[in-house]
Amino acid sequence: MELPDGRLLAEVSRVSGLISISKTSSRAENWRRVASRIGADPQELSELIDPIVNIYAVADHTKCLTFLLAEGVVPSNVREGYLTRLLIRRTCRLLRNLSIEDRLFDIVEMQISLWSRDFPHLKELQDEILELLSIEKEKYEQTLSRGHNLVKRIIQERRSRGTAEIPLEELVELYDSHGLTPEVVSEMAEAEGVEIHIPENFYSYVAEKHMAAPEGERTPLTEGIEDVKEEFSDLPETERLYYKDAYIKEFKAKVLRVSGKRVVLDRTAFYPEGGGQPADQGYLEFNGKQSRVTDVQKVGGVIIHFLEGSVPKEGDEVTGRIDWERRISLMRNHTATHIVMGAARRILGEHVWQAGAQKGIDRSRLDISHPKRLSFQEIKEIENLANRVVMENRSVETFWLPREEAERNYGFRIYQGGVVPGREIRIVKVEDWDVEACGGTHCRLTGEIGLIKIIRTERIQDGVERLIFSVGESAVKAIQETEGRILRIAEILEVQPEKVERTVNNVVSEWRELRRERERLADRLAVYLAENYLSDAEDVAGVKVISKIVNAEEADVDLLIKVSAEIIKQERKAVSVLICIDKNARLVVNVGEEALKLGVDAREIAREAGSKLGGGGSGKPNFAQGGGTRIEGAGEALKKAKDVILRSVKE
């Protein structure tokens, strides 16, 4: 690339600094003003300067990407992950424009080398940064390979409506759903003779859409709490006994306020819902009565108990009893979540952050940032490592620290569930394993968890893997259920459990061979039926029309598709219209190459013949399907098909 004269660059830089940038002036307008000031042609100046601008943009983008990926941001379609993906794809496009698209990794390595002098962790994370970049670049390349046909089809559809313009909404959809940048779409459209207008604010427009946090659903319960928020605002903060001792099962307290079935006490051991941990349940006893606590919520510093049955009066002394089996199960699950999180980070890499969590009694889930599906081996390694921490019976400490001290001591990794409010934050520390800011209840020792079993994983969105796991007795039960299924399969196969895998493989192999043999027989049958049907072909305006009504017991739809394909293979001037009768009527239309040239369209035949079956049809010009529930209309459908063929040829 030939660089422009240094004096020209200096002059452009000087004049550009004098130009006032406003929302009302476009980039093109500002560029014309710069060119005018230095007495240059805007187009010629742009051709000289744009490559330099692109070089600086690449340097800026790759620096930004280096730090984003080092901080564990995984490219995705939401929030910061979306901005990372946007940067990677824009960088790839800029490098392609500069004809150095294969140098992305070299440039990022240079950034790591430069900035690791002040930020040593970048060098430690180099392999991880490059792997995340490689995965995303490969996705982008796959997107581009699929994109041309997609854009071509959209342009054809727009032309059929009388316009070739692709509106902004469709450009956004192409970018969001298919990863095609508007610049790439523009290049592809130009090849089709279409010019695309790209708004200057395109990227900021789509970024704003994706940076919006999802709105939480308001439940009747939450709405109820908001309604009484003012009513409880004059009360002192509830003393939280569960923080003093998470193992308190029973306590005494005084009733401060009653509102309907809502009760506020001066102190409580009932944990309110929060941080992905469900609320405690149990009982309040007062004046010889017992009422069930069904839910507990926290509003500000006040904890509200939701009762079922009688309610105490203000000033009453009550005894609270925690549903201990529920509480200890939630404690085990919550501590296990921290352990699994630490294991996932050690096995998968430092890019792993918690993207969400929900603790349950029988099962819990942990959502983690990760660019690809977890393999069975990775799941096994995470599970083994987590259980090793359980068996080592490590201590679990909880303590309060000033925010600045906590961040200084443990870094921002403590905010796995998001940044918590307050000058002082509660820290949960699993000995030599995991440290997080957390308000939940936890075991004192990891050994109390008993066992951790990862049941399955799910890909809940791009860049986020969900681990669903059970602990303690629930984990044992899950293992027993799996073992039971294996034993039942062994009984069905009449083999010993240890031989199930080999036997299933043999059965599947045999089944696949039978399926292949069935396909071979179906192909031979299709050839035979095609020859048979062709012998009964009817001449309609020079086109050989094969029209048949077939019972599903004789030939199903899949076979008829093969037959119709074989018919037009043998006779290029043929049109095959076959109807399969079962509970419904299914229509298959295939048009030969020569018949297509005469104007016959399979879509039109399927649509009009399908209407006689009480339905419709659609597809491509050479192949379409249709049908409906009116099986008695099959004869009319074939007659309509012939009418359409005759009309098409005559036109």
Image: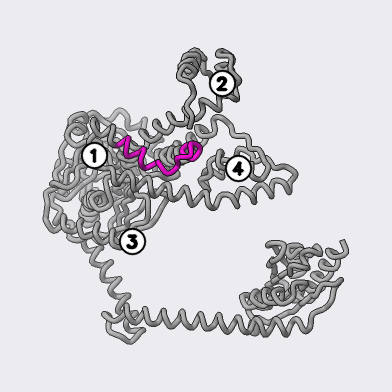
Point out residue 52 in the picture as x, y percentages from the top left corner.
Answer: 47, 28
Point out residue 84 in the picture as x, y percentages from the top left corner.
Answer: 41, 39
Which residue in the protein does label 4 denote? 170
Q: Quadrant of residue 539?
A: bottom right
* Label 2 with label 1: CB-CB less than 8 Å: no
Q: Residue at x 19, y 45 (%)?
A: 434
Which residue in the protein does label 1 denote? 414
Point out the tag, 2 or 3, that comes first from the N-terminus.
2
* Up-down relation of residue 30 to residue 172 (above or below): above
Q: Residue at x 73, y 46 (%)?
A: 161
Whether residue 40 is visible here, answered yes or no, is: yes
- Image check: 172 left or right of 311? right
Q: Residue at x 20, y 56 (%)?
A: 386
Point out the tag, 2 or 1, that comes first from the N-terminus.
2
* Up-down relation of residue 250 to residue 112 (above or below): below
User: What's the distance in space between the residues labelled 1 and 3, CA to CA?
Assistant: 26 Å
The boundaries of the magenta stretch are 94-112
Q: Nearer the viewer, mark 2 or mark 1?
A: 2
- Image check: 246 left or right of 86? left
Whether residue 327 is visible here, answered yes or no, is: no
Which residue in the protein does label 3 denote? 456
SS at mark 3 in the image: strand
* Up-down relation of residue 587 to residue 277 (above or below): below
